[in-house]
Image (cartoon, grey):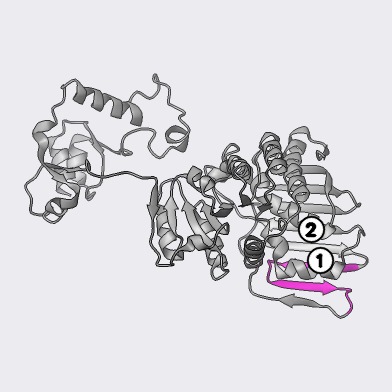
Amino acid sequence: NDVISQAAQMSRKRGRIILVGVIGLELSRAEFYEKELSFQVSCSYGPGRYDEDYETKGNDYPLPFVRWTEKRNFETILSSISKKYIEVDPLITEVVELKDYLKIYGEIGSSKSIASLLNYSDITYSNTITVSQNRGNSSNKSNKGVAIVGAGNFTKMTMLPAMKNLGMDLQYIVSSGGLSGTTLAKKFQIIQSTTDYDQVLKDANINTVMITTRHHLHAPMVKAALMAGKNVFVEKPLALNNEELKDIINAYNTSGATLTVGFNRRFSPHALKMKKAIGYGDTPINVIATMNAGAIPPDVWVHDLKVGGGRIIGEACHFIDLISYFTGSKVVSVCMNAMGINPEENTDNASILLKYENGSNGVINYFANGSKAYSKERVEIYSQERTLVLDNWRKLKAYGFKGFKGMKSKLDKGHKSQFTLLAQQINSGGDSLIEFESLVNTTQASFAAIESLKSQSWVDVMN
């Protein structure tokens, strides 16, 4: 608190005090009142800090409007140091080898040093960190290795726990920075953590690549893995546009590898029970799937059409696949209407109508403006004077079915069953968990939904 008080005492009348960093902020009203001082907290490094459009996408602020951006601040100070306008050498008290870091940090409270530098000159850098798990020589499991690409929340909270004890030979985890991947490698006994995706593709011991990155990386990573002859599991969506999808189709047709998309809901015991109840024939049915998705702030990457693709392509595709599974057919045309007078392409409040090849109808209500107290997901099937109602993957009720009234369970969206089947495929061989033609049809239908919103008409799904 003394620092802010001293600044107020030093300032001229009507001066400005700008805080960079963290100090005590118990302000003295008298000190600020008498001089009519202005106080401002600055983002570290200046304008642009924490702005994803600026820091990640490179969209700079126009010079006439924002003179001192984060980048220009750094450029100016570095230029001043290089031209000797600013002398920093006198500030450096000592240079310490990295291995002797305790000389700095061990005495940081009592040292009279102004600036201490750590010297990294003897460090050898590598994109790969080997994490020893005392699992023996896993290379004996030739051609059965698994590489996980992406170390985000889905991998951490859902996928890896569901894959535990399934007998998968987890060889790699790949992450952009390395730290999150290494943490998960230690926790789940994955042999290596790396930032180098190419290393995975070149490893002959890798059978399957599992991709859980942000959506815009799915298609190029899937294409590269297929071309390297690797079987692929990728979280939804498969692609964000038709060009990406065409590249995947071409790579798949020439690779001989398998491709599975993480449409886990069709593997839930509830979905399997519903499919068995309505039968496997070609009789048309009506299906209504409602997603009480909840709101996500507009600046979250999922809404970014180039990164996340929006929630319809990025998430509603789950329900296109689920309805296709129930109908046993392919989507032939799509119509989507969204809430609002002029809805944006990345809307997350929309109703999608699906027309199927065998005459079935599907309705997907994807809403972000509902109550959190209401069930998040609900699926209804109407067939031959019979009805099935699934509430939030916990409770299934049946009406008009002889000898079947429903079932109850803990929340089960099918992740465990999906990864169990995937482990069996990796270790024993076999086809993709979902037919490739169905994956393509679902992806094309999601694109058609957006096209329908823009054209305000029904859109045929590409064959």
Q: Which of the numbered marks, if any, corresponds to residue 5?
A: none
Amino acid type for the residue under numbered disc 2? Tyr
Q: Which of the numbered marks, if any, corresponds to residue 325?
A: 2
| CA separation in Å, label 1 and label 2 | 8 Å
**Residues at badges 1 and 2 in contact (C-beta under 8 Å)?**
yes
Secondary structure under the numbered disc 2 in the rendered image: helix
| Residue nearest the observer in this picture, 262 or 285 | 262
x and y, in percent, of residue 118 in the image: 18, 44
Q: Which stretch did the figure color magenta?
A: 386-402
Query: Does residue 88 appear anywhere in the picture?
Result: yes
Residue 227 as seen in the image, left or right of residue 358: left
Q: Is residue 390 magenta?
A: yes
| Residue nearest the observer in this picture, 359 or 294 | 359
x and y, in percent, of residue 3 in the image: 16, 44
Residue 117 as seen in the image, left or right of residue 301: left
Earlier in the chain: of badge 1 and badge 2, it is: 1
Residue matched to label 1:
275
